[in-house]
Amino acid sequence: MMIKQLFLTTISISICTMVLGQGATKPRQHLVKENNIYLSFNKAKSNIEYFDYNKGLRNGNPIISNDVFAIKSNTTCNIYMDWLNPLQYVITFKDSIYDDPDIKILEDFLQLSYGRLNTVSTTATNSLTTSYEKLSKESIANNEKDLISGLEFIINKNPFQDKDLRILQIFFFKTKFKAEEKTSILNIYNELKDLDSLQTDHLSEMKLRFKKLAETDKISDLSTEITETNNKITEIKKNIDKIKNKVIRFSPVNLTLSDNFDNVHIISSIDDYVEKVKAKMQVDELGVKKIQEIVALLENSRINPDDNSKLEYFRVKQIQFDEDKHVKTSITITKYKIDSDNLEIIKDKEVVNKNIIFKKYDPVKISVSTGIFFANFTLKGYGVAQGSTELTVQEDNITSNTVIPATFLNFQFDLGSRTLLPLLQLGVDPSKKRPFILLGAGFAIPKSKFAITGGPIWTWEQSLDKLTVGGPVPSTSDLEKDIKYTFDMSPKGWYLGLQFSF
């Protein structure tokens, strides 16, 4: 009767525990059958979601920190994620050491100084244009026969792009040169004109390409943006090569005029301009190199695609571990702000930081727990009775209905349920002389860490060695020395176990 009452009470407690436990969010175990897991970054909710791609599911559940992924086939797991632009989001794993090459590239790219690059002026000012027209008329009006005006043999009279060269250009128009100096002046002028015409604002173009690459959100658009960027980089490199060939002509400037002041002025002006061109060219080459590294970074973001997903998902991590080990990895996604005008990538914040655990799948989970069990049993025992003249051995049958603490070894069977799992159990109570052995079965509610079990119990039976029941015994201590303990293969009763934490 007491067992029945206890059983009903236990069932009530377990139901209450299940209901109260529903509010707690605890890690879950996901079975990985084909060594691949698929994650998707939900930007709106700033969370990572997991789904089973092979089942055609796309609406994943948010990853809960310390979620467990049990690998069924071996101890390797590939983590696939939908594509994220590495210029917007950086994914790192705590169990690996990264130099963060993407951020390093972007930081190096910031070394391109906007002020240093902005050396090309593409528009002539009104004052310079006015001066040019005025000096042209003055030069044409000059009829000195021993001097030749630059305007009389210079065909291309359009203003230079560079403001410093425009000043030198005016000097050419204003100055009179001897007839034998005509060829040298004309060659230098034309070569300067060619070099000046090759100067292009590559910085603006690189900013534009950087902005387009950084703002690309779809993997389907990435190929087009990379192709256009590579084509533009090819054009810039060809332009730089042409500039290099032109610069060689002015290293050094070969010019000998009769007027030493004019000679020094022209050479010094050309040298200053050439140095400026070289500095810009070096910065442009650095910019090209960094843009190429950024393109390579984007290219690397789409390697290792999952063939089954039609290039929607890409492998971002491979986990390997020993069968007797668990691997915990921390996935961090950091968001970056993009300032394309200043070529800056600014760290915004960490939007995701989740720990997930990988282990080898085992359908049986083993755990050790403590709890209590209620047992109804009858045991044979021996005592001492006072006879008429002496102490005698007396046999007693001890019937007990009691609650006893015990330690349990549990074998839980994973059937895919998070609320109810069957289990087998081996238990031992802490008594030293006649410990109970329990072997039972039941069910566990792992989410609430609660279990109910029941089964037969065994223990050690007492027997007499030399003494006999009803026979004389000198003392109680002599009786205890004579008693033997033998394990009885027959169950002594039944138990009902209750565990609150395992």
Image (cartoon, rainbow, N blue to C red):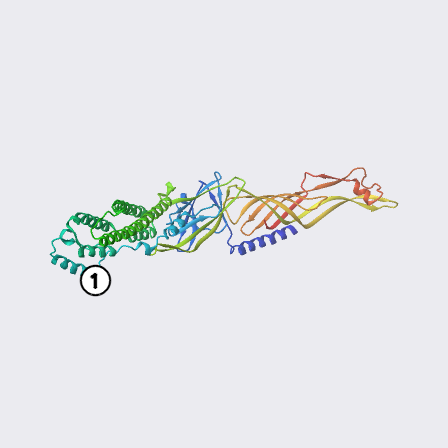
Query: Foreground: 52 or 373?
Result: 52
Q: Position of residue 197 (x, y in %)?
A: 22, 50
> Mark 1 — residue?
127
Where residue 182 sits in the image (x, y, percent)? 16, 49
Q: Of all residues shown, which one is farthest toward the right?
A: 389
277 on left or right of 436: left
SS for callout 1: helix
* Whether residue 59 is visible: no
For label 1, the crowd category at 10 Å Cα-Cα, with few meaning under 14, some 14 to 19 and many 20 or more, is: few
**Residue situated in front as seen by the camera: 442 or 268:** 268
Residue 171 image point, x, y percent: 20, 56
Judging depth in this view, the residue of 37 and 121 nearest the camera is 121
Count of marks, rendered view: 1
Give, as a three-letter code, the residue at label 1: Ser
Q: Is residue 139 left or right of residue 79?
A: left
Confirm whether residue 432 shows in the render. Answer: yes
Q: Could you tell whether 23 is left or right of 260 in the image?
A: right
Image coordinates of residue 274 in percent, x first then y, are 27, 50
